[in-house]
Amino acid sequence: MPGKLSGKVAVVTGASKGIGAAIAKHFAAEGAAVVVNYSASKDAADRVVADIKQNGGRAVAVRADLSKPAEVNQLFAETKKNFDKLDILVNNAGVYEFASLEEVTPEHYHKIFDLNVLGLLLATQEAAKLMTSGGSIINISSVAATSAPPSTAVYSGTKAAVVAITGALAKELGPRKIRVNSINPGMVDTEGLRAQGIGESDMRKQVEAQTPLGRIGQPHDIAGAAVFFASADSAWITGETLYITGGYR
């Protein structure tokens, strides 16, 4: 039986690990050819590609820093060169970094906004050019867009911007049969989370205590929803924001 994404081509940004890697693998399992984008973690991206190929799927790894327009252009040129079209874009690449008000600097602001917001816009701009027969764009935002914990003014600001951008682009691209939706995960057990020292922290325990389902998420908890938004199952859904948080808000 063909997968839900058979014959489709997807670009997943920031797909070398965590949520992005899980989405790339789920897409491939449903029949999509996947471009696994990464910025620094070449070995990890190559492992994702190898895993997909080992399971009978098609994938290539392409390096690009999405905050740099020339590299964004190259990412989509490589997509066209390898697969000749594009049906799905997952804007997952992002910086997960907190700073108190006293610690906010122009450098911190630009580091977070240039990737989490500008990078998303630049990737969508190039992807839309290749989506000549319609498509699906899935933006990965965060529960922080609305929960806005302390010391996340910049990070939460970027994720709120992603929600607003999702709504605007859904209206703008709808006439071209391109759907745009947002997934807002809660705390998910990823390499990025552990790198911030949150993996086994009191903050994690506090979030779990306030989460009706009693645990933080795993990357595969997000990937299934991405498949839904990428597939014909969501053909009449655009401009929506789906919170996947175990009930934590």
Image (spheres, helix red, strand yellow):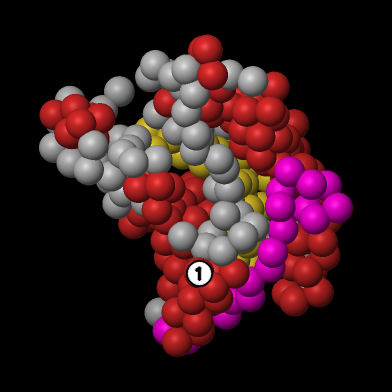
Q: Which residues are magenta?
A: 55-72
Q: Residue at x 79, y 47 (%)?
A: 68
Quarter of the rendering occupied by the C terminus: top left
Residue 83 can be seen, yes or no: yes
Q: How many labels, in total?
A: 1
Three-letter amino acid code at the position of disc 1: Ala
In the orientation shown, which residue stands out farthest toward the top? 102
Give x and y (percent) for residue 46.
55, 76
Picture quadrant where residue 121 is located: top right
Residue highlighted by disc 1: 44
Would residue 247 be found to the left or right of residue 139 on screen?
left
Give x and y (percent) for residue 78.
78, 69
Mark 1: few, some, or many residues within 10 Å (few <14, many ≥20)?
some
Q: Nearer the viewer, residue 210 or 129?
A: 210
Would residue 153 be found to the left or right of residue 33 on screen?
left
Picture quadrant where residue 6 is located: bottom right
Quarter of the rendering occupied by the N terminus: bottom left
Give the SS element for disc 1.
helix
Q: Nearer the viewer, residue 192 or 51?
A: 192
Q: Residue at x 35, y 47 (%)?
A: 194
Can residue 151 be found in the magenta stretch?
A: no
Would residue 110 be found to the left or right of residue 219 on screen?
right
